[in-house]
């Protein structure tokens, strides 16, 4: 057969070497990460990366355009302690917007508690009531992209289905809207409001600041009131102690007045003591009358008032006559009252009785004032007499025992009195402070209505979305490549398969003749790559020959791959043409029984004689088939065709294939067999076992690594103990996606033939 076939190939790469692994060792998937291969992987998946990146960027821009503007208003409050301690109860369930980035010193620790107080529930609810937020339409503005979309559908800015928000809902919203932050290393509280309304943000920030100060004033008042209660309680105890010491001193003086007078030889001391006792008794009696009269006036007990007035004598009032008058008036009043119940129309009589009752009350008041004055005079006289007695005792020459007892009692009385007076003064001061409480903190910077929104624009979300899209898609491309990716580069294939060395065949150029690239340019890099493959084949075959597995006849080279379209037929044709030019007799056999790619590539008609031979049709023995071959031509091609129902693994069919190959060995120097892919047809593995040397073709960036791994494992087991030769085909100088290489290969396969 003439060897005028139009074919052309590209430049090939040099052969690479690596230490061979033991054949029985399990082949591991290469997990080494190479930066160059990683970039190549991303470059091959650039379409997906760009598509996802721009899609998420567009979605981010859309999301950013839908997010409503947020306006931030800030109010600064200078905190100053009032000097009194207030025990504030902070609900632990509240989560105020409070943060501190740096630890504060001791003098600033109180500012942390103030930040919690400013976001307390009492302050929040006062702000709600003060601004009437329940019905404020600004609280219904959309606050999210979803709310904006809903508002656009409803064609209204009000996104709430409720006309008035509940207090609990408002508290929840304000806890998310208001942020109170103590400024680091200072006593300034920063109150920040972030809402969808500029005016609402300013109103909320100022309202929270003012309500916080108001609550601080109220807290000061509560502190003062509690302090007053504590002081008054202590003052009452001091008063009782003072009274007890004075009574003890007085009783000691009275009890020892006679003996002291005799010891001192001064009878005036006994007389002063007697006067003191009389005045003290009169003062106590007047005090009791005053207290009783105050109680009776308070309850308007006219009978008791009349009786009290009868006991005073006729010093200031004509007590006896007036008492009788009061008795009569009281009796008339009682009778009139009962009559009024029977006759409600007697208003004149009622007015007269009320007038008399008023006069009686006035007289009782006058008497009460007199009693108060008398009690005061008696107390002054009592104090004067007590002082004179004490002076008389000190002036007298008394024994040390008597003087010591008197000094101790007097010191106790004086100390108790001073304590009482101090507590009384403190109580007066606290009461004044409670009535005149002023805020200790103040607003140093009020919030104004913000002019510009503080939120990030659509550009930010577009950039973030695009960045996330690029990262996500890059991760997907890398993960997909690691899990399901194809072989990338000769080094990766060497590590993946664990081979000693492999040959690299560059991708075919856009040409219409495969043979021309070899016949017209035999020194081309592509031809050199085929020569390197031929050298590897001859070396492998020579080893087998020395081991006695070959008989010195022609060599059978079987080409296979893991999946279709990896370049078996093209490589087989190139090897056949190159070796035919060297003067060897070459036979190219198409034994791809499922899909005759080589015959289609050469434009040959289906070879029915080969079908009949493999089917075992009688009258067409193998000798007749072989006798028809033209062995004088440097290159002889045995075309094939699709064989359905032929199983090479059946002993009879396997024997026919073996006899065919043995017959070809006797007639040709090199028999190149093109078979089906290992994972596509089961007979391919059997045919490789019948050949002398196997060439495993792997197309770069094409078949998944898992498929290559499975096919290589099967081929290793079938060829044991000899390892097949590996060739990496269709490698570009600048690796592109396998789709591009496949497209170029398709163009070459479909090109017109000469």
Image: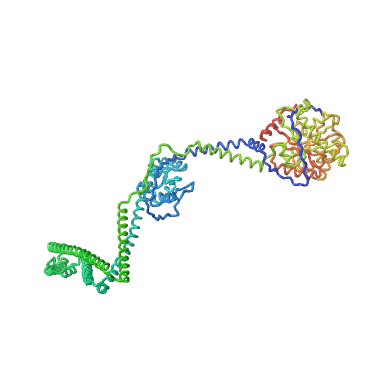
Q: Is residue 640 visible?
A: yes
Which residue lies at the image location 74% right of the left edge and 45% below the top edge?
27
Where is residue 511? Give x, y as percent. Answer: 72, 27
Q: Quadrant of the C terminus?
A: top right
Closer-to-camera residue (160/99): 99
Where in the figure is residue 307, as x and y percent of width and height? Answer: 17, 70
Number of marks in the image?
0
- Viewer-proximal residue among 307 and 628: 307
| Residue 657 at x, y percent in the picture | 82, 40
- Drawn side of residue 225 relative to residue 382, left or right: right
Left or right of 143? Residue 306 is: left
Q: Quadrant of the N terminus?
A: top right
**Residue 345 visible, this angle:** no
Closest to the observer, 473 or 608: 473
Describe residue 253's horizontal placement relative to residue 50 as left or right.
left
Residue 65, position in %: x, y? 47, 37
């Amino acid at each position: 057969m003439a060897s005028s076939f139009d074919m052309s190939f590209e430049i090939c790469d040099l052969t690479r070497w690596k230490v061979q692994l033991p054949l029985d060792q399990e082949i591991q998937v290469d997990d080494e990460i190479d930066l160059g291969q990683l970039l190549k992987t991303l470059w091959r998946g650039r379409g997906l990366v760009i598509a996802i990146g721009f899609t998420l960027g567009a979605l981010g821009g859309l999301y950013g355009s839908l997010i409503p503007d947020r306006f931030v208003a800030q109010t600064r409050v200078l905190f100053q302690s009032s000097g009194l301690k207030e025990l504030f109860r902070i609900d632990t369930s509240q989560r105020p917007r409070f943060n501190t980035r740096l630890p504060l010193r001791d003098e600033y620790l109180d500012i942390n508690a103030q930040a919690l107080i400013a976001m307390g529930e009492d302050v929040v609810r006062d702000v709600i009531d003060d601004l009437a937020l329940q019905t404020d339409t600004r609280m219904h503005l959309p606050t999210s992209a979803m709310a904006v979309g809903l508002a656009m559908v409803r064609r209204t800015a009000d996104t709430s289905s409720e006309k008035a928000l509940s207090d609990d809902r408002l508290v929840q919203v304000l806890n998310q809207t208001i942020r109170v932050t103590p400024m680091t290393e200072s006593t300034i509280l920063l109150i920040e409001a972030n809402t969808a309304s500029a005016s609402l943000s300013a109103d909320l920030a100022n309202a929270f600041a003012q309500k916080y100060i108001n609550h601080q004033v109220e807290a000061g008042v509560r502190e003062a009131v509690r302090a007053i209660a504590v002081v008054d309680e202590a003052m009452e105890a001091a008063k009782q102690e003072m009274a007890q010491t004075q009574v003890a001193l007085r009783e000691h003086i009275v009890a020892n007045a006679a003996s002291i007078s005799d010891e001192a030889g001064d009878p005036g001391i006994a007389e002063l003591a007697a006067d003191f006792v009389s005045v003290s008794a009169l003062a106590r009696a007047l005090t009791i009358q005053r207290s009783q009269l105050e109680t009776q006036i308070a309850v308007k007990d006219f009978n008791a008032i009349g009786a009290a007035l009868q006991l005073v004598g006729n010093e200031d009032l004509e007590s006896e006559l007036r008492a009788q008058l009061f008795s009569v008036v009281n009796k008339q009043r009682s009778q009139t009252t009962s009559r009024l119940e029977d006759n409600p129309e007697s208003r004149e009589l009622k007015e007269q009785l009320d007038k008399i009752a008023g006069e009686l009350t006035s007289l009782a008041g006058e008497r009460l004032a007199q009693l108060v004055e008398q009690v005061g005079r008696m107390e002054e006289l009592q104090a004067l007499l007590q002082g004179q007695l004490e002076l008389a005792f000190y002036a007298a020459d008394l024994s040390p025992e008597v003087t010591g007892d008197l000094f101790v009692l007097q010191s106790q009385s004086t100390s108790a009195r001073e304590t009482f007076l101090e507590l009384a003064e403190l109580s007066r001061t606290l009461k004044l402070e409670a009535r005149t409480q002023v805020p200790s903190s103040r607003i140093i910077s009020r919030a104004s209505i913000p002019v510009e929104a503080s939120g990030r624009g659509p550009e930010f979300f577009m950039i973030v979305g695009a960045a996330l899209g690029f990262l996500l898609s890059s991760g997907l491309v890398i993960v997909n490549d690691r899990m399901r990716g194809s072989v990338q580069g000769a080094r990766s294939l060497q590590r993946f398969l664990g081979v000693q060395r492999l040959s690299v065949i560059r991708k075919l150029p856009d040409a219409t003749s495969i043979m021309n690239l070899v016949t017209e340019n035999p020194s081309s890099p592509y031809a050199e790559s085929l020569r390197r493959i031929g050298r590897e084949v001859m070396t492998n075959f020579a080893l087998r020959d020395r081991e006695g597995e070959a008989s010195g006849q022609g060599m059978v080279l079987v080409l296979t791959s893991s999946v279709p379209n990896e370049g078996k037929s093209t490589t087989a044709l190139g090897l056949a043409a190159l070796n035919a030019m060297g003067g060897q007799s070459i036979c190219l056999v198409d034994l791809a029984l499922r899909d005759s790619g080589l015959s289609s590539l050469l434009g040959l008609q289906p070879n029915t004689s080969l079908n009949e031979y493999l089917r075992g049709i009688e009258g067409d023995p193998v000798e007749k088939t072989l006798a028809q071959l033209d062995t004088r031509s440097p290159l002889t091609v045995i075309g094939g065709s699709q064989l359905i129902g032929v199983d090479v693994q059946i002993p009879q069919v396997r024997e026919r294939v073996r006899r065919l190959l043995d017959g070809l060995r006797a007639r040709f120097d090199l028999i190149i067999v093109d078979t089906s892919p290992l994972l596509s047809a089961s007979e391919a593995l059997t045919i490789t076992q019948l050949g002398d040397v196997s060439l495993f073709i792997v197309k770069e960036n094409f078949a998944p690594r898992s498929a290559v791994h499975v096919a290589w494992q099967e081929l290793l087991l079938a060829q044991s103990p000899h390892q097949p030769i590996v060739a990496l085909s269709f490698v570009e100088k600048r690796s592109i996606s396998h789709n591009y290489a496949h497209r170029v290969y398709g163009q070459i396969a479909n090109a017109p033939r000469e």
